[in-house]
Image (cartoon, rainbow, N blue to C red):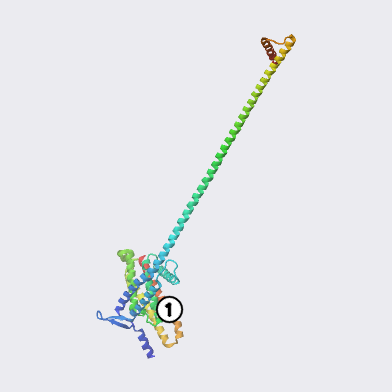
Amino acid sequence: MLSTNIWTIIFIVINLIILFILMKVFLFGRVNKILDKRAEIIRRQFEDADVAQREAEDLRVEYEKSLASAKEESAQIVDEARAKAKDEYDRILDDAGKEAEQMKEKAMSDIEAEREKSLNSLKNEIAGLVVSATAKVVGRESLDVDNSKLYDDFIAEMGEKIDE
Amino acid sequence: MGDLSEKLIEELDCKTVFTIPLFGGIDVAESVVVTWIIMAVLVILALIFTRNLKVENPGRRQLMVESAVTWLQKFVGDFVGEEGKAYVPYLMTVIIYLGIANMIGLFGFKPPTKDLMVTAALALMSIVLIQVASIRAKNVGGWLKGFTKPMALVTPINILELVIKPLSLCMRLFGNVLGAFVVMKLLESVVPVVVNLAFSFYFDIFDGLIQAYIFVFLTGLFIKEAIE
């Protein structure tokens, strides 16, 4: 019942060592290799996902930044345009005012010139009338230029008196 | 009755199957042959189950093996803790071997663990492994100093433990398996097979697995103690 076969101990020790090696190589080793590989793949996938997420986040930030700058830029453009338009408006208004002033002045001077002209022609006519009236009074048909000048002077004198 | 006891004694005998004519005759015991059979079966099963394992889309067979190995690794790994990871494969091998060896009575073989020399060999390996683990973890100085802990007074007891630990491991396993074997053989000769079956569940399966568990659990525990 109680064997004392020392060889059994030696055999069992050797057997167990062999079994241990075989099990480690063929069972645990193989299975663990697969498990490690799978864990590695999963880890890498997580890493990839992380990287992708970070990239997406970067892109988003960049996009937001560019959007903000675009907004700013557009606001600036609008401001500039508004300023320009205001300048233009002011300039046009100014020009129009100036032009109107010029036209007014020109009109005034035209009117003045016209008035002058018509006054002169009136004077001449009056002078003529006076000459012809005088001629009638004097009884002579023709008069010297000297006389005509004489009347002109007279009229001028009279005119000044009237103006006054 | 005399017939029964004769049969029983024959069953209990650890027969020598054959002798290798070397060094004045190496006796190969029955338990060694059964161990070889167990080894062959285990290796063949391992080879079959781990044939073309795939990283992606594992089949049912592979999933089964994976979960079994992972479970056992965690189960045994808990005995030795995180630092004793290196010893997990050995402990797994022993628990698988012992589990099968203790239950092999179901298939009509004599359990190898019924042979005191087999359990002695296992216990010997356990105590050597424990000491090696201690030396690896703490160097020779630390290992020697470990004998004086927790105080110098207990040094003799600590040294005695070198014998007591493997002896208790060896005897516990041997006694349990032998007892279960004797009870089963007795039952086999007196009651019908159906009743036997119920007892077989306890003595062959439950007790066999429990003893394998205890042996590996204690070895793991000692290793954990040794490397702390």
Q: Label 1 neighbourhood size at 10 Å, few (<14), some (14-19), many (20+)?
A: some
The answer to whether residue B47 is seen in the rendering is yes
Residue displayed at 68% across by 18% down: A121
Residue displayed at 32% across by 69% down: B131
Residue B210 in the image: state x and y as whole percent: 42, 76
The answer to whether residue B221 is seen in the rendering is no
Residue displayed at 62% across by 27% down: A102
Q: Quadrant location of residue B223?
A: bottom left
From the viewer's perspective, is A94 left or right of B194? right
Nearest the eye: B195 or A102: A102
Q: Quadrant location of residue B127?
A: bottom left
Q: Is residue A120 above or below residue B174?
A: above
Residue B4 in the image: state x and y as whole percent: 38, 89
Q: Is residue B191 above or below residue B93?
A: below
Which residue was labeled with disc 1? B205
Q: Which quarter of the image is occupied by the N terminus of chain B?
A: bottom left
Residue A13 in the image: state x and y as whole percent: 32, 74
From the viewer's perspective, is B138 left or right of A62? left
Nearest the eye: A125 or A66: A125
Q: Amino acid type of disc 1?
A: Ile
Nearest the eye: B165 or B10: B10
Element on which disc 1 rests? helix
